[in-house]
Image (cartoon, rainbow, N blue to C red):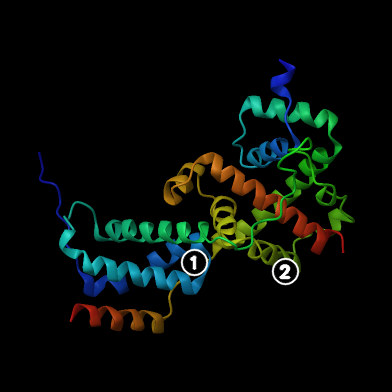
Amino acid sequence: MSEPTIHTLTPNLWIDNYADYLYNYTITRVNDSDLSKDLVQETFFAGLKSAKNFQGRSTERTWLVSILKRKIIDHYRKINSNKGKAEVRMNFYNDGENEGNWIEERVPQSWHNESEKTIENEELKDQLEDCIDNLPEKYGMVFRMKTIQGFETEEICKELDITSSNLWVIIHRARTQLRKCMEDNWFNI
Amino acid sequence: MFKKLKITCDEATTICDKSQYNEASFFEKIQLNWHLFNCKLCSLYVKQNRKMTSLFQMKSADCKEETKCLSKMDKEAFKKELEKLEV
């Protein structure tokens, strides 16, 4: 039986070898350039500080990614616990005899000239981006990971430490808000 | 039997959203279709939701083509900060 490979750390090469990879990894999850840079930098710092704990069983990139993942979870928990920050507007009554029914002023309206309005163009893309940007941060983060980046449900739940029912509540609220945003700012103007 | 099929508009539209990712179960799809028989608002939501999915797919295709890199300046700044820590 062959001996397992023992990997070593070369911190002086981290920036050249892994900075872009880690930055890309982060920005696909948090969609914020400055925040991504901060998280990558914090990852390198944390890596350096805990270098003595590296046992060499994984590659240094895998090890750095595992540190970065924890930073991303910490960030998600922080935005998730930000009380008083904008929540998505509710579309359904959440108690009383109408519980689960559409709130009158939020019911879907017919869209005018729908086929003309869905011809792909830059204006349409910009409006969609604006609507996504207007989602509360945690909704935007989960929505982008699931819908724009195409991550598997299981992967998102694992990375953000949330349940799948939690994820679907977030996706549902994000999508109903986005539908309404596009209705008000694109389809029916 | 019919009691189990009865769902609210909130639940119906949640299932509709799940089905946009092919993640609604067979039973959920039956519940959704049963609900749509009697609910014009959710039927409209379903139709518009499909359109929204095609817009999201267009956005997704654009994003996946992009690879983002750090600038040389950012990398130099990182290196300086790391060096401070190493000293």
Q: Nearer the viewer, residue A166 or A3?
A: A166
**Rendering coords of residue A22 (x, y %):** 38, 65
Q: What element carries label 2?
A: helix
Residue beneath disc 2:
A122
For the question of whether residue A118 can be seen, the reply is: no
What residue do we see at 69% from left, 36% from top? Answer: B11
How crowded pointer 2 is (Cα within 10 Å; few <14, some 14-19, many 20+) is rated as: few
Q: Residue at x 42, y 68 (%)?
A: A23
Q: Name the residue under label 1.
A: B67
The answer to whether the residues at label 2 and label 1 have Cβ atoms under 8 Å apart is no
Q: How crowded is mark 1: few (under 14 residues within 10 Å), some or many (20 or more)?
A: few
Identify the image quadrant of residue B62.
bottom right
> Where residue A13 appears, x then y in whole percent?
25, 73
Q: In this view, does A158 lie to the left or right of A5?
A: right
Query: Which one is nearer the viewer's eye here, A11 or A185?
Result: A185
Question: x%, y% of residue A95?
Answer: 72, 40
Q: In which quarter of the image is the N terminus of chain B?
A: top right
The kind of residue tagged 2 is Glu
Is A135 on the left or on the right of A83, as rendered? right
Residue type at the position of mark 1: Thr
Residue B75 placement, left or right of B41: left
User: Where, by quadrant of the figure, is residue B36 drawn?
Assistant: top right
Residue A108 percent coordinates (x, y): 82, 48
Q: Which of A104 and A109 is in front in this view?
A: A104
- Subunit ID for the residue under disc 1: B
Disc ID at residue A25: none
**Image mark 2: chain:** A
Respond whether the residues carrying marks 2 and 1 are from the same subunit: no
- Between the C-alphas of marks 2 and 1, the distance is 20 Å
Secondary structure of the residue carrying numbered label 1:
loop
Which of the 4 quarters of the picture holds residue A63? bottom left
